[in-house]
Image (cartoon, rainbow, N blue to C red):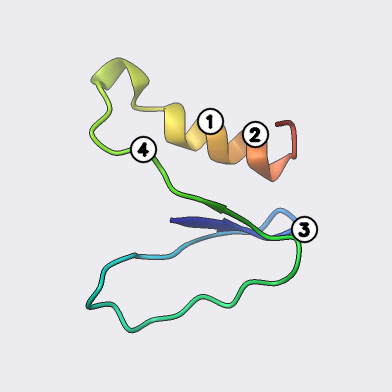
Amino acid sequence: MVVIAPNGDTHTVPVAYWNSADARLIPGSLVYVPFTSLPSEFAHLNATIVNLLTRRML
């Protein structure tokens, strides 16, 4: 998952039931869960969505 802070900083946080790492979220943060198993013509989709969310265009 990708955590997007209100100031535009992004952090990728691994998600798994065995992962003991936690992510501290500040108020106003967005959490984006990327698509998996995309066809090759949509390989850039996750990066584009994160880019748009970082700039708050959605």
Q: Nearer the viewer, mark 2 or mark 4?
A: 4
Residue denoted by label 4: 35
Q: Which residue is mark 2?
A: 52
* Residue furthest bottom in the image: 20
Instruction: Tell me the distance, in whole angstroms, between the alpha carbons under discs 3 and 1.
Output: 18 Å
Q: Quadrant of residue 37?
A: top left
The residue most toward the top is 41
Q: Which mark is residue 33?
A: none
Q: Horizontal placement of 56 versus 49: left or right? A: right
User: Label 4, label 3: how many angstroms apart (C-alpha)?
Assistant: 24 Å
Counting other residues with Cα less than 10 Å from the Cα at mark 4, is it few (<14), some (14-19), or many (20 or more)?
few
Look at the numbered disc 3 and give the secondary structure of its residue. loop
Q: How many labels were placed on the picture?
A: 4
Of label 3 and label 2, which has the lower sequence position? 3
Q: Residue at x 43, y 56 (%)?
A: 1
Query: Pointer 3 and pointer 1: residues touching (CB < 8 Å)?
Result: no
Q: Quadrant of residue 4?
A: bottom right
Residue 49's x, y, as percent?
55, 34
Q: Reading the chain from its start, which is encountered first: label 2 or label 4?
A: 4
Whether tag 3 and tag 2 are in contact, CB under 8 A, the answer is no
Residue at coordinates 63% horizontally, 72% vertically from top-left? Answer: 25
Seen in the picture, residue 41 relative to 13 is either above or below; the reply is: above
Task: Provide the residue designation for mark 1.
Answer: 48
Q: Determine the residue positioned at 74% across, 31% down.
A: 57
> Of helix, strand and loop, which one carries label 1?
helix
Tell which residue pokes out farthest to the front in this image. Answer: 17
Residue kind at label 4, given as amino acid type: Phe
Amino acid at pointer 2:
Leu
Q: Amino acid at mark 1?
A: Thr
| Amino acid at circle 3 | Asn
Which residue position holds label 3? 7
